[in-house]
Each structure stands twice: as structure tokens, then as C-alpha cells.
């Protein structure tokens, strides 16, 4: 059944296509069906999501540790430059002392600049809330950064088709045909479902 929207583009309904001589048609509210299908897909993906999120957390922590190591190296080199400039200033004769002092002050300023940049961008380790957010598949699914197109791709990868039948008014039977060949059957109450008319 294709989706149709009311004249104002609001609530979607799935309606069978009929020719003018046909009088009976099924009509189903799309929101409840789609919510059930989303819930089923998220339940199927949950164990995999936990495994993937563990890898994501490990990758994030490794990247953070590598970045920290690079920053410690930059800051250490800047401190060496300051110390070298200080020693050059201390060993300089009075004619060169002014130039060596400027080099020393420039090295101190550069080390301070790097320290500020490091503090401004410093990424703290992931805490328990971060871990929970990464593992919360529904949070990722509903995130503004997850596009409708991405959700549709996931649904198509998981499901071959979904058959919806209005059994009697306000009761739906959904049969999900999963990509692996499994079928699951579900019943759903829909106060707006209609058979006929």
C-alpha cells in the first residue's frame, strides 16, 4: 500500500490502490506501523550495536591517547626550546644578549600559546554517560545527525517487505519478512484502521 497524506501534508496513511469500480479498500495509519517496525529493527540490532559501540569506544579512546601523546610531545619540544633559548641568553656576550633575550621571550610565548591551544581543545576521557550515549542505539537512531535516508537504508537492509492487513476495523496484522528469510507476525491496534469504504 502506498503512503498518502492529507491535503495539508500531515498524517500519512497507507491506502490500497483501487480502481473506480472497486468499493472496498484497506486504510492504515502509517505512524503506528512505522513505530512498531522501528522498534522491531532496533531490538534486532541491539546486540550488534553493543558490540559496535564497544569498538567505537575503544577507537575513540585510542585516538584520544594518540592525540594526547602528540600534544605532550609538542609541549615538551616547546619547553626544550625555552630552555635552549634561556641557556643561549645566559651564555651570550653583551652584544648578542638583546637578540637572545628576544628569542627566549618568543620561545616562552610560543610555549604559552601551545598550552592555551591544548587546554582549549583538551578532550577528557569518555565517562560513563558518554559510554551510555554511544551504546544507546535509539538515541543514535533519533539523533538529528541521523538522516531519514540513513534510517531507510538500514530498514531496507533488515527487511525485505512488511505485509499489513486490516483484520477487522481497528486491528492490524503485520508480517515482517526479514532479509535472512525469517518471518515474524505482530498484531497492532489502530483506532484509525478501516476495511472497506
Image (cartoon, rainbow, N blue to C red):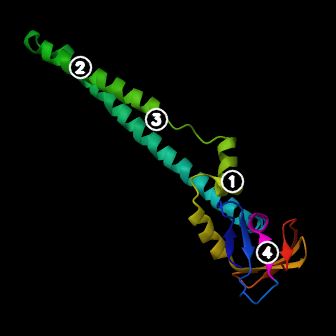
Mark 2 is surrounded, within 10 Å at the Cα level, by few (under 14), some (14 to 19) or many (20 or more) other residues, namely many
Q: Quadrant of residue 97?
A: top left
Q: Earlier in the sequence, mark 1 or mark 2?
A: 2
Q: Earlier in the sequence, mark 4 or mark 2?
A: 4
Question: Is residue 26 inside the magenta stretch?
Answer: yes
Residue 176, image x, y percentages: 77, 78
Q: Is residue 99 above or below residue 21?
A: above
Q: Is residue 3 above or below residue 96?
A: below
Which range is magenta? 25-35
Q: Secondary structure at mark 2?
A: helix
Residue 18, image x, y percentages: 73, 85
- Residue corresponding to mark 3: 121
Whole-angstrom CA distance, mark 3 to mark 2, is 26 Å
Q: State which quarter of the image contains the C terminus.
A: bottom right
Q: Quadrant of residue 39?
A: bottom right
Whole-angstrom CA distance, mark 1 to mark 4, is 37 Å
Q: Residue at x 68, y 52 (%)?
A: 139
Q: Earlier in the sequence, mark 4 or mark 3?
A: 4
Q: Earlier in the sequence, mark 1 or mark 3?
A: 3
Q: On residue 104, which mark appears?
A: 2
Whole-angstrom CA distance, mark 4 to mark 3, is 54 Å
Q: Secondary structure at mark 3?
A: helix
Residue 60, image x, y percentages: 55, 50
Question: Is residue 191 inside the magenta stretch?
Answer: no
Whole-angstrom CA distance, mark 1 to mark 3, is 25 Å
Q: Are marks 1 and 4 in contact (CB under 8 Å)?
A: no
Amino acid at each position: 500500500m502506498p503512503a498518502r497524506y492529507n491535503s495539508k501534508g500531515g498524517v500519512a496513511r497507507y491506502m490500497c490502490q483501487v480502481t473506480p469500480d472497486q468499493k472496498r479498500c484497506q486504510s492504515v495509519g502509517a505512524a503506528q506501523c512505522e513505530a512498531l517496525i522501528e522498534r522491531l529493527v532496533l531490538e534486532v540490532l541491539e546486540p550488534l550495536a553493543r558490540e559496535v559501540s564497544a569498538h567505537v569506544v575503544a577507537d575513540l579512546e585510542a585516538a584520544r591517547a594518540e592525540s594526547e601523546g602528540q600534544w605532550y610531545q609538542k609541549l615538551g619540544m616547546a619547553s626544550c626550546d625555552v630552555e635552549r633559548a634561556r641557556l643561549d641568553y645566559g651564555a651570550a656576550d653583551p652584544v648578542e644578549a638583546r637578540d637572545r633575550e628576544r628569542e627566549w621571550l618568543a620561545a616562552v610565548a610560543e610555549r604559552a600559546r601551545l598550552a592555551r591551544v591544548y587546554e582549549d581543545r583538551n578532550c577528557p576521557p569518555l565517562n560513563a554517560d558518554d559510554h551510555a550515549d554511544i551504546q544507546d542505539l535509539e538515541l543514535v537512531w533519533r539523533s538529528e545527525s541521523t538522516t531519514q535516508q540513513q534510517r531507510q537504508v538500514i530498514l531496507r537492509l533488515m527487511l525485505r517487505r512488511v505485509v499489513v492487513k486490516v483484520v477487522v476495523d481497528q486491528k492490524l496484522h503485520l508480517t515482517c519478512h526479514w532479509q535472512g528469510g525469517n518471518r515474524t507476525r505482530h498484531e497492532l491496534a489502530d483506532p484509525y484502521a478501516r476495511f472497506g469504504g
